[in-house]
Image (cartoon, grey):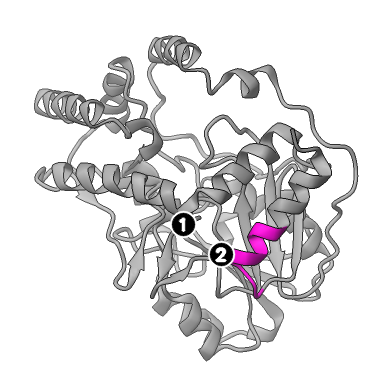
Amino acid sequence: MLGYAEIFSQVRHRLKEIFPQYPCIYLGKRAGTLLFQALKHEKRSTVVLPGFICPEISALVLQAGKIPVHIDVDPQTMHMRVNLLRDYLNNHSPADASLLIDHSFGYINPDIALIKAEYPDLLIIEDCARAFGGSCNQTPAGSFGDWVILSMYKTVLGNEHGGIVLSRKPLPCTTDGAAARSSPREYLSTIKALRIIHAYLKSRTPPLGSEPPMQENLTCSLETGLPSTLITRRFLKNLNQVDKVHQKQGWAWKDLYNSLRQYPEIQLIHVRPETVPSYAFLSFTMSGISNIHLFLQKLNRSGYFLFNAWPDPPNYYRNMQATFPCGYENTRFLSQHLIHIPIMDFSSENRRLLFIQRFEQILTGL
């Protein structure tokens, strides 16, 4: 079995094959920590990012000593509204700003190349944590930014940590330290019998809560060190099979998409022209349902684990509300109405068929 150094070397080699434009590759236990380190030493004072985003990213921007600016999003795509972004950049110095563009839940944002051409002094961070395998104009997502964020766990079965930052130029990211230890859960999580038991226990959990209350301050924790040997090995396997995995998930994604598009109660997130999603998640909104948490809980009890992320984007924190120069109406809408289907849980055609039947039963009951 390969040692840690050899696995690390192979990960670097494979990433250089996929992303030859990024000679600098940094692995860590958390991509957020690597991003924090890079931002902390970046002279630009402002980081522009979509309003609908994991709140921990906004928190680490603030902790890095930068000014976060959130741009409201298009609820049909989850991507920041490019007209609002242009309005902001035209009235502020792009040379003093970094722009984080998220390929939200694997739905590829094609605006990066255009924005980069219009604002060449802007530093662009491309967040591909859930977008690996997706593409724009037949070019892999992650090919257009100055820095790129990859996750070793958000779309890899069994992994619970690990992150990567790619860069065109060297960054002050700390990649030394001991490798993390994998938890017993990470070792056991790919055993089918144990996953069945876990799914049963998960289906017994209490109902999800309603809209979260307003909170005072948004903070994040940082974890240094390297990903574990197990996590790195699994990620390498995923890298070596990326085309095969993408094709397999694409079949399941398209099958579910065609089944769900018939229901007027839901609005499927749009796939932007000239893009191909990563097919990691199929996302939709349910604006006509008064209680999506009840809907999700009924599916949960039937063994279908959909989720609504993010229910608490940055606008739910008082120390972030002033960072939305154009408001957060659409960001709040998505936090209340957006649902994601993790495609890796629906690779079986029979499971998809049973899911659609149960989906329709619950929808009719509501």
What amino acid is found at the position of numbered circle 2 in the picture?
Answer: Leu
Asked whether, in this view, residue 291 is left or right of residue 343, the answer is left
Number of other residues with Cα within 10 Å of mark 2, as a class: few under 14, some 14 to 19, many 20 or more: many
Q: Is residue 68 visible?
A: no
Question: Is 244 situated above or below 327?
Answer: above
Q: Position of residue 69 (x, y in %)?
A: 59, 66
In the image, residue 15 lies in the stretch drawn in magenta: yes
What amino acid is found at the position of numbered circle 1 in the picture?
Answer: Gly
Secondary element under disc 1, as helix, strand or loop, is: loop
Say which mark, if any, is on residue 49. Answer: 2
Give the position of the N terminus as an image quadrant: top right
Depth check, front residue: 223 or 154: 154
Q: Position of residue 317 (x, y in %)?
A: 57, 46
Residue corresponding to mark 1:
133
Residue at x-position 32% and y-position 58%: 75
Depth check, front residue: 7 or 70: 7
Which region is colored magenta?
13-21
Residue at x-position 32% and y-position 34%: 347
Q: Position of residue 98 (x, y in %)?
A: 65, 73
Depth check, front residue: 54 or 107: 107
Asked whether, in this view, residue 312 is left or right of residue 289, the answer is right
Give the position of the C terminus as an image quadrant: top left
Q: CA distance from mark 1 to mark 2?
A: 23 Å
Question: Is 255 situated above or below 346?
Answer: below
Q: Quadrant of residue 327?
A: bottom left
Instruction: Tell us which disc is closer to us: 1 or 2.
Output: 1
Secondary element under disc 2, as helix, strand or loop, is: strand
State the residue lying farthest toward the right: 177
Say which mark, if any, is on residue 299. Answer: none
